[in-house]
Protein backbone atom coordinates (compact mmCIF):
# COMPACT_ATOMS: atom_id res chain seq x y z
CA UNK A 1 0.00 0.00 0.00
CA UNK A 2 1.33 3.42 -0.92
CA UNK A 3 1.42 6.11 1.75
CA UNK A 4 -0.34 9.28 0.66
CA UNK A 5 0.04 12.41 2.77
CA UNK A 6 -0.58 16.09 2.13
CA UNK A 7 2.23 18.57 1.59
CA UNK A 8 1.37 20.09 4.98
CA UNK A 9 1.74 16.68 6.63
CA UNK A 10 5.14 16.15 5.00
CA UNK A 11 6.32 19.66 5.94
CA UNK A 12 5.29 19.34 9.60
CA UNK A 13 6.99 15.94 9.83
CA UNK A 14 10.24 17.07 8.21
CA UNK A 15 10.31 20.37 10.12
CA UNK A 16 9.89 18.57 13.44
CA UNK A 17 12.59 16.00 12.62
CA UNK A 18 14.99 18.80 11.60
CA UNK A 19 14.24 20.72 14.81
CA UNK A 20 14.69 17.61 16.93
CA UNK A 21 17.99 16.70 15.30
CA UNK A 22 19.34 20.18 15.97
CA UNK A 23 18.00 20.25 19.57
CA UNK A 24 18.65 16.74 20.83
CA UNK A 25 21.83 15.59 22.49
CA UNK A 26 22.75 13.36 19.53
CA UNK A 27 25.16 11.35 21.68
CA UNK A 28 22.12 10.22 23.70
CA UNK A 29 19.08 10.33 21.37
CA UNK A 30 18.14 10.27 17.72
CA UNK A 31 14.98 10.79 15.70
CA UNK A 32 13.77 9.16 12.50
CA UNK A 33 10.70 9.65 10.39
CA UNK A 34 8.38 7.53 8.30
CA UNK A 35 8.43 3.82 7.70
CA UNK A 36 10.19 2.71 10.88
CA UNK A 37 8.26 0.07 12.80
CA UNK A 38 7.09 0.08 16.39
CA UNK A 39 5.84 -3.27 17.67
CA UNK A 40 2.85 -2.70 19.95
CA UNK A 41 2.06 -6.33 20.66
CA UNK A 42 -0.96 -7.25 18.57
CA UNK A 43 0.16 -5.09 15.67
CA UNK A 44 3.02 -3.12 14.20
CA UNK A 45 2.67 0.63 13.69
CA UNK A 46 4.72 3.01 11.55
CA UNK A 47 4.60 6.39 13.32
CA UNK A 48 5.58 9.58 11.55
CA UNK A 49 8.42 10.19 14.03
CA UNK A 50 10.21 7.95 16.54
CA UNK A 51 12.85 9.06 19.03
CA UNK A 52 14.95 6.59 20.97
CA UNK A 53 18.25 6.38 22.81
CA UNK A 54 21.51 5.60 21.05
CA UNK A 55 23.34 3.32 20.51
CA UNK A 56 20.78 1.93 18.13
CA UNK A 57 21.22 -1.33 16.28
CA UNK A 58 21.60 -0.02 12.73
CA UNK A 59 20.29 -3.29 11.31
CA UNK A 60 17.14 -3.27 13.43
CA UNK A 61 13.83 -3.11 11.58
CA UNK A 62 11.89 -1.70 14.53
CA UNK A 63 12.27 0.68 17.43
CA UNK A 64 13.17 -1.37 20.49
CA UNK A 65 12.69 1.34 23.13
CA UNK A 66 10.97 4.47 21.79
CA UNK A 67 10.92 7.46 24.14
CA UNK A 68 8.76 9.77 22.05
CA UNK A 69 6.34 8.92 19.24
CA UNK A 70 4.72 11.62 17.09
CA UNK A 71 1.91 11.34 14.57
CA UNK A 72 0.85 14.07 12.14
CA UNK A 73 -2.87 13.87 11.48
CA UNK A 74 -4.26 12.60 8.19
CA UNK A 75 -7.99 12.73 7.41
CA UNK A 76 -8.24 8.96 7.09
CA UNK A 77 -6.39 8.10 10.29
CA UNK A 78 -7.12 10.92 12.76
CA UNK A 79 -9.64 8.84 14.70
CA UNK A 80 -7.07 6.02 15.02
CA UNK A 81 -4.30 8.38 16.18
CA UNK A 82 -6.48 9.60 19.08
CA UNK A 83 -7.84 6.18 20.06
CA UNK A 84 -6.26 2.86 19.01
CA UNK A 85 -2.73 4.14 18.48
CA UNK A 86 -2.81 6.16 21.68
CA UNK A 87 -3.85 3.10 23.69
CA UNK A 88 -1.22 0.92 22.00
CA UNK A 89 1.57 3.47 22.38
CA UNK A 90 0.73 4.07 26.05
CA UNK A 91 1.40 0.35 26.65
CA UNK A 92 5.07 0.77 25.66
CA UNK A 93 7.00 0.89 28.93
CA UNK A 94 9.83 3.06 27.55
CA UNK A 95 7.51 5.70 26.05
CA UNK A 96 7.54 9.04 27.84
CA UNK A 97 5.57 11.17 25.37
CA UNK A 98 3.01 10.80 22.61
CA UNK A 99 2.52 13.79 20.34
CA UNK A 100 -0.17 14.40 17.73
CA UNK A 101 0.26 17.36 15.40
CA UNK A 102 -2.15 19.12 13.08
CA UNK A 103 -0.88 19.23 9.48
CA UNK A 104 -2.57 22.57 8.80
CA UNK A 105 -2.17 24.89 11.78
CA UNK A 106 0.06 25.23 14.84
CA UNK A 107 -1.81 22.87 17.13
CA UNK A 108 -0.33 19.96 19.08
CA UNK A 109 -1.82 17.42 21.49
CA UNK A 110 0.75 16.18 23.98
CA UNK A 111 0.60 13.37 26.51
CA UNK A 112 3.63 13.03 28.81
CA UNK A 113 4.06 10.29 31.37
CA UNK A 114 3.80 11.72 34.88
CA UNK A 115 4.76 9.59 37.88
CA UNK A 116 4.46 6.45 35.78
CA UNK A 117 1.13 7.18 34.08
CA UNK A 118 -0.12 9.11 31.09
CA UNK A 119 -2.82 11.71 31.77
CA UNK A 120 -6.30 11.03 30.39
CA UNK A 121 -6.42 14.38 28.60
CA UNK A 122 -3.64 15.85 26.50
CA UNK A 123 -1.96 19.17 26.99
CA UNK A 124 -3.02 21.26 23.99
CA UNK A 125 -0.29 23.54 22.68
CA UNK A 126 -1.23 26.04 19.98
CA UNK A 127 -0.05 29.18 18.26
CA UNK A 128 3.25 30.09 16.68
CA UNK A 129 4.47 31.70 19.91
CA UNK A 130 4.08 28.41 21.85
CA UNK A 131 6.65 25.67 22.42
CA UNK A 132 6.51 21.89 22.29
CA UNK A 133 8.28 20.97 25.53
CA UNK A 134 9.44 17.36 25.76
CA UNK A 135 10.55 16.92 29.36
CA UNK A 136 12.12 13.47 28.87
CA UNK A 137 14.48 14.90 26.26
CA UNK A 138 15.00 18.30 27.88
CA UNK A 139 14.05 20.11 24.66
CA UNK A 140 11.63 22.88 23.77
CA UNK A 141 10.82 23.40 20.12
CA UNK A 142 8.97 26.51 18.94
CA UNK A 143 5.77 25.72 17.08
CA UNK A 144 6.83 28.50 14.69
CA UNK A 145 9.73 26.25 13.66
CA UNK A 146 7.57 23.14 13.31
CA UNK A 147 5.01 25.02 11.21
CA UNK A 148 7.44 27.11 9.15
CA UNK A 149 6.08 27.16 5.60
CA UNK A 150 2.78 25.65 6.71
CA UNK A 151 1.09 28.26 8.87
CA UNK A 152 0.61 31.50 7.03
Image (spheres, rainbow, N blue to C red):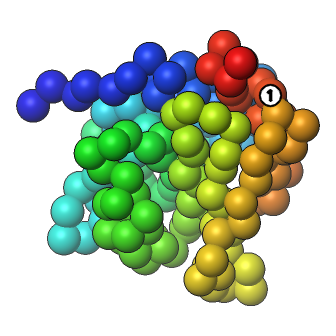
Residue 60 percent coordinates (x, y): 33, 39
Residue 99 percent coordinates (x, y): 59, 54
Instruction: Residue 77: tell me if it is visible.
Output: yes
Residue at the image position 84 percent from the left and 44 percent from the top: 131
Residue 124 percent coordinates (x, y): 71, 60
Q: Secondary structure at mark 1?
A: helix
Nearer to us in this view, 7 or 135 = 7
- Residue 127 falls in which quadrant of the image? top right
Check the image and name the residue furthest to the top: 149
Name the quarter where the C terminus is drawn. top right
Residue at the image position 86 percent from the left and 43 percent from the top: 130
Nearer to us in this view, 47 or 72 = 72
Residue 21 drawn above or below residue 75? above
Check the image and name the residue furthest to the left: 1
In the rendered view, does 100 fall on the left or right side of 109? left
Instruction: Residue 14: tell me if it is visible.
Output: no
Residue 25 percent coordinates (x, y): 79, 36
Q: Identify the residue position indicated by label 1 in the image.
A: 144
- Residue 113 falls in which quadrant of the image? bottom right
Residue 81 drawn above or below residue 12? below
Amino acid sequence: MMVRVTWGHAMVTSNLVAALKSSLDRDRYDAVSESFAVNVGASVRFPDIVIQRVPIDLKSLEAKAPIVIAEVLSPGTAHIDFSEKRKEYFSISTLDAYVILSPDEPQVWLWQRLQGDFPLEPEIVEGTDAYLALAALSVEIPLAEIYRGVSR
